[in-house]
Image (tube, rainbow, N blue to C red):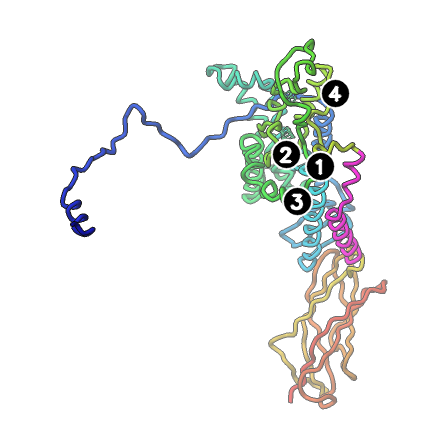
Amino acid sequence: MTTPESNTSSKSSVKKPRKVIPIVSDPNQEEFVSLYESEQKIYPRSTSGFFTNWRWITVWITQIVFYGMPWLQWGERQALLLDISTHRFYIFGLVLYPQDLIFLVVLLIIAALALFLFTAVAGRLWCGFACPQTVYTKIFLWIEHKVEGDRAARIRLDTGKFGIKKVYKKTLKHALWIAFSMWTGFTFLGYFTPIRTLFDNIHLLQLGPWETFWIVFYGFATYGNAGFLREQVCKYMCPYARFQSVMFDQDTLIVTYDEERGEPRSGRSRAVDAKEKGLGDCIDCSFCVQVCPVGIDIRNGLQYECISCGLCIDACDSIMDKMGYEPGLIRFSTQNGTSKHWSKHEIIQRILRPRVLVYTGVLLFLCAAFAITLGMRSPFKVDINRDRGVMSRLVPGGNVENVYRLQLTNATEKTQAYRISVSGLKGLTVASKKEFLVNAAESRSVSVSLQILDGSIKSGSHTIYFDVSQEGSDEKVSEKSIFFMSR
Ligand code: SF4
Ligand code: SF4
């Protein structure tokens, strides 16, 4: 009889020879797999149609505003100037100081909320039609098209041999791109430093090192982004592209391919009766893919790369027209609209859904608060600092004196006279000069001394108010401070 133990020991004592499998790869089957995939250059084909025209209209509007605005005058000065060196922002009739930074912050919040609202309703229309990256890419592509030709010619030129024609076309294209980029850099700087002076400095070759740096920096950023990176900025660098999907819902307008109508896709001639053959309306011509500036196939469904430019709609509509089919195989619609076969009217009705109403309400509230606060903004400001060297001192005449520094800021476009008085303590008077002139859009620091009869108040700190009024108007500013009476 054998026990389990004795059985095991007898098994372990009989060792089988080990089979050794060598880990040597077969050189004939070796394959190098790179985890890096280089971007394929996209050669968008030209198209025409409703959305193409609208894209050009928005390019013109945005560029006329961008290049024209710094040249606009408001009285004696530039209408829009963000003068960082003097800490003044001139926005038409408005002069903002560092203390007014809150207005800029609110303005940015309003812009962000407007973008949320716009995205919830109309998807990425901003990206396709007004975003600077898209707009400059379109302008650069137009230059490329004019110099090198349309898609097929550009592919031929890039894959063809090096020769005089290729060198000439490439040099001309890059020269035009660089010239346009430098003009863009110059205009950009013109928002921060007076553009007319900047223009004269360029003519007189008197451009400072920082001015030169910013023009070249912004110029080359434009050249690089619009000439080379193009759709990669939208795909990999733009944060909006990443989080815009959370603002989408089933009723957001997007560019959609009507799969039900288009499939099964197949090439055919005009003479073929698609219904009879059981074919969908898509003739698989790939025109919609060739015109796409981000190089995607919208027939694969909604993709985060799609910037809603509508060019594939124009391309497909032109094909539908040639085939004698209804336009709109690719169209702006909503996911609900497509799946539930809604009419345009039904899709538009869904715009006013709760989410959109909440965004609109918050946006309107912020806009109203911004306008009211801006309207109530005082045309001058007063900041008070006690003179730290002189807490309180006894002066001839039996008075006790405290000295203050008042920073008077004139936020108007004219020289103003300000009158200073004081309240809060009986017998307290302004012993120094009471009236001061401050030039337009300037700040002035003035010294003011206050006196009171020694012994007329208890020792310690007393709350007082500086009342500063602007001459010739009812504007008045009251600022709290402390009068210190020593023991
Ligand atoms: S899929 Fe159509 S709408 Fe989207 S980016 Fe491409 S061309 Fe523009
Ligand atoms: S352009 Fe229209 S017909 Fe041609 S492949 Fe695209 S969806 Fe199909």
Magenta: main secondary structure: helix
Q: Is-magenta flag for residue 362?
A: yes
Give residue 228's position: percent from left, percent from top.
54, 30
Marks 1 and 3 close (CB-CB < 8 Å): no
The residue identified by callout 4 is 326
Instruction: Label 1, secondary structure: give it.
Output: helix
Residue at the disc numbered 1? 336
Label whose residue precedes the other's in the sequence (2 or 3): 3
Q: Earlier in the sequence, mark 3 or mark 4?
A: 3
Q: Amino acid at mark 1?
A: Asn
Query: Measured from the top left, where is residue 291 in percent x and y?
Result: 62, 24
- Name which quarter of the figure residue 73 lies in: top right
Q: Amino acid at mark 2?
A: Ile
Asked whether mark 2 lies closer than 8 Å to ligand 1, one says yes
Q: Is residue 402 above or below residue 325?
A: below
The image shows residue 266, relative to residue 62, as above or below, that is: above
Please name the residue that numbered disc 2 is placed on: 307
The one nearer the camera, 165 or 355, is 355
Range covered by the magenta-colored residues: 345-373
Disc 4 residue type (three-letter): Glu
Measured as percent of width and height from the top left, residue 282 is found at 65, 20
Q: Earlier in the sequence, mark 1 or mark 3?
A: 3
Secondary structure under tag 3 reads: helix
**Does residue 349 appear to the left or right of 10 in the view shown?**
right
Category of crowding for the residue at label 1, using alpha-carbon neighbours closer than 10 angstroms: few (below 14), some (14–19), many (at least 20) = some
Give neighbour class at mark 2: few <14, some 14-19, many 20+ (Cα, 10 Å). many
Q: Which residue is mark 3?
A: 247
Q: Is residue 323 left or right of residue 15?
A: right
Closer to the eye: label 2 or 3: 3
Q: Tell whether label 1 touches label 2 (CB within 8 Å).
A: no
Given this view, does label 3 or label 4 mark the residue nearer the observer?
4
